[in-house]
Image (spheres, grey):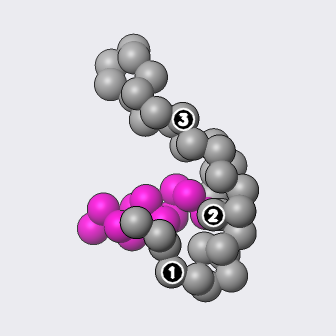
Amino acid sequence: DYAYIERLVRTSFDVVVYMEKTDILEVHYEPEHKLALLNGQRQRR
């Protein structure tokens, strides 16, 4: 399940990098989002 994997990654790491081969597509650094997930709040979309 993609949502489960994304939540697990976002609560385990401070920086999430989406890549395609050697190209960086997105970089996310959202400590507030990680804290909200760890505190049991729903993931925003």
Type of amino acid under label 3 = Val
Above or below, comparing residue 5 to residue 39 in the picture: above
Location of residue 32 in the rendering, given as x and y in whole percent from the top left corner: 71, 62
Q: Is residue 26 left or right of residue 37?
A: left
Tell me the distance, in whole angstroms, between the alpha carbons under discs 2 and 1.
10 Å
Circle 3 SS class: strand
Q: CA distance from mark 2 to mark 3?
A: 14 Å
Please name the residue shown 57% across and 42% down the image: 28
Q: Which residue is mark 3?
A: 27
Disc 2 crowd rating (10 Å Cα; few below 14, some 14-19, many 20+) is: some
Residue wearing tag 2: 33
Q: Is residue 5 magenta?
A: yes
Marks 1/3 in contact by CB < 8 Å: the verdict is no
**Of callouts 2 and 1, which one flags the residue occurring earlier in the amino acid sequence?**
2
Circle number at residue 24 = none
Disc sitting over residue 42 in the figure: 1
At numbered mark 2, what does the secondary structure look like: helix, strand or loop?
Answer: helix
Say above or below: 17 vs 39: above
Residue at the spot 52% in from the left edge and 56% down from the top edge: 9
* Image location of residue 30, percent across then percent down: 65, 52
Please provide the residue range marked out in magenta. 1-11
| Cα separation between marks 1 and 3 | 21 Å
Q: Nearer the viewer, residue 35 or 11?
A: 35
Quarter of the image where one finds residue 40: bottom right
Count of numbered badges drawn on the protein: 3
Q: Is residue 43 above or below residue 30?
A: below
Residue 21 pos. (x, y %): 33, 19
- 17 horizontally vs 3: left or right: right
4 to the left or right of 31: left
